[in-house]
Amino acid sequence: MQGKVERSVFIEGMRLHLKCGTYPEERSLGVQVKLSVKLTGEFVDYQELHNLILRLSRNTYTYLEEFQEALLKEVLNRWNIDSAIIETVKLSVPFQHNFERVGVELRWRRK
């Protein structure tokens, strides 16, 4: 087979209750988020990835970016991946809104 095979492991649409937000109520009561993670490169056990996400979701964060960066750091310590995409969609926001989705996407690639 010619060429390079690239494989990805992903978890899409994982619902979590995160203690995350700029308002104290969000950090104490928590917010609902939907998380999608895609890792390319070395084999990653998605059950182990799932358990890692659950463990990190028990911490308190001010920003979704903090949660994503904590997850990326742990992933990089465990697996030799080439790239990562982490999308976090906040399902409940603390203000009146007129939009479908709000969230943060982190993209990382090994140089």
Image (cartoon, grey):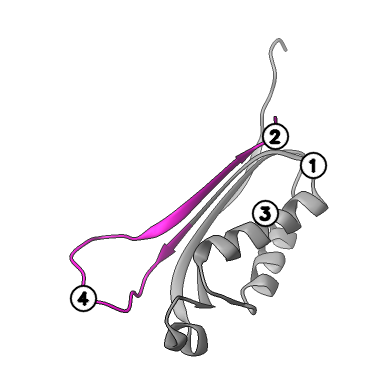
Comparing 16 with 99, the one in front is 99
Amino acid type at mark 2:
Arg
Mark 2 or mark 1: name the one nearer the start of the chain: 1
Comparing 94 with 34, the one in front is 94
Q: Which residues are magenta?
A: 88-111
Residue 72: numbered disc: 3
Measured Cα–Cα span from mark 2 to mark 1? 10 Å
- Residue occupying image coordinates x 75% and y 58%: 74
Residue 110: numbered disc: 2
Q: Residue furthest top?
A: 2
Helix, strand or loop for disc 3: helix
Q: Is residue 91 magenta?
A: yes
Judged left or right of residue 77, residue 14 is left
Helix, strand or loop for disc 4: loop
- Residue occupying image coordinates x 51% and y 61%: 35
Mark 3 or mark 2: name the one nearer the start of the chain: 3
Measured Cα–Cα span from mark 1 to mark 4? 42 Å
The location of residue 34, given as percent across then percent down, is 46, 65
Amino acid type at mark 4:
Gln
Badge 2, how many Cα within 10 Å: few under 14, some, many 20+?
few
Q: Which residue is mark 1?
A: 80
Badge 3, how many Cα within 10 Å: few under 14, some, many 20+?
many
Mark 4 or mark 2: name the one nearer the start of the chain: 4
Q: Which residue is mark 4?
A: 96
Helix, strand or loop for disc 2: loop
